[in-house]
Amino acid sequence: MIFTISEQVLAHASFFSLFFATFIYWGRFIHINNKTLNISGKIGMIIAYFCITGFLLTRWISSKHFPLSNLYESSMFLSWSLTLIHLILENRSRNNWLGIITAPSAMFAHGFATLGIPKEMQESLYLVPALQSHWLMMHVTTMILSYATLLCGSLSAIALLIITATKRENFPTMNYINLLFGLWIFKDYFELLKSNVHESRKVSSFTNFRKWQLIQELDNWSYRIISFGFPLLTIGILSGAVWANESWGSYWNWDPKETWALITWLIFAIYLHTRMIRGWHSKESAIIASLGFFIIWICYLGVNLLARGLHSYGWIFLK
């Protein structure tokens, strides 16, 4: 009973911390130079990280196995991984835009776990014989960490494509994005636009330069993050193959989960190949990374919820 209450308190506290951090980071679009907002957003992510860590530890103690045995626990671990990646990258890069990507990602993963999954699937159950293995922690942990890392890199690539698209004048709807970007760059953007033509041109030139600078930053960090996540994905697939051989007598069974994991690996292998061998940068490589974003969600959720297989634990086919 105590463990159950503790889990609920920690889960709710971490979700509201992530919601608060997301609100703060997106609020910095307007007040980018506000130091109070910068500190508040970071504190919100730190609180969320420790609350989710406490939740996972409590779950581990109460269930007596590592909390990665079902979709609920893996989604919470995905949210924890995203907050961890955020704290590491924010400390290393000290940039102002990272939380715009990582905070809502962690919040949505957490929200799906707590609000989207039926209550009966959130309960901790005894492990089936196939999961009673030391490979559970090795394989699933590595896979979820690779998903979180690759998602951050892919979202950076998507942001790059959005900013690049704002330069194209044949998209009138992009004016709203340009306005938001202008607000992000200048706190007094409206006042500068009301000034003379010369000042307006200076604003436009600086905005274009800042866009180019941000595109370079996003491209660089997307590549670096994906370069870190790809080896994790490789290790996760190889450890899963060894575990499958122990449990089912075969390294590879062409299970839907395995097939889509291979597709995910191939997509990001192509991304890295085109970057390192072909010399692709910015928009060209970002398109491949953006495709990887959707492939990851198919591999992580779509297969589990819709397909029948050795890895399926969704509720759609159970009804």
Image: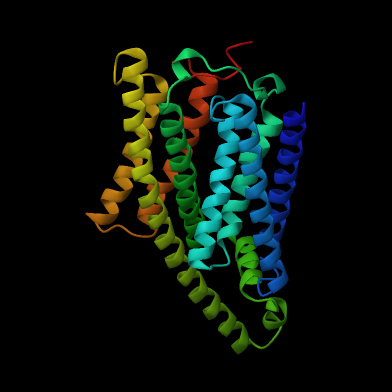
Residue situated furthest left in the rendering: 277
> Residue extending furthest top?
319
Task: Give above or below for 291 relative to 35.
Answer: above
Foreground residue among 13 and 228: 13
Question: Foreground residue, 129 or 304?
Answer: 129
Q: Is residue 253 at least partly visible in the picture?
A: no
Image location (x, y in percent) of residue 164: 47, 61
Residue 9 position by quadrant? top right
Rendering coords of residue 75 (x, y %): 58, 34
- Side (left or right) of 233 relative to 305: left
Image side of residue 289 versus residue 48, left or right: left
Query: Can residue 158 be seen at all in this image of the molecule?
Result: yes
Q: Residue at image x 61%, y 67%?
A: 181
Specify the quadrant that holds the C terminus: top right
Q: Which quarter of the image is occupied by the N terminus?
A: top right
Indicate the position of residue 56 as horizontal and vertical percent values: 61, 37
Decide if residue 241 is on the left or right side of residue 192. left
Its colouring scheme is rainbow
* Residue 271 higher or lower than 118, as above or below: below
- The residue sitting at 56% across, 38% down in the picture is 77
Which residue appears at 61% of the width and 43% of the height? Answer: 53
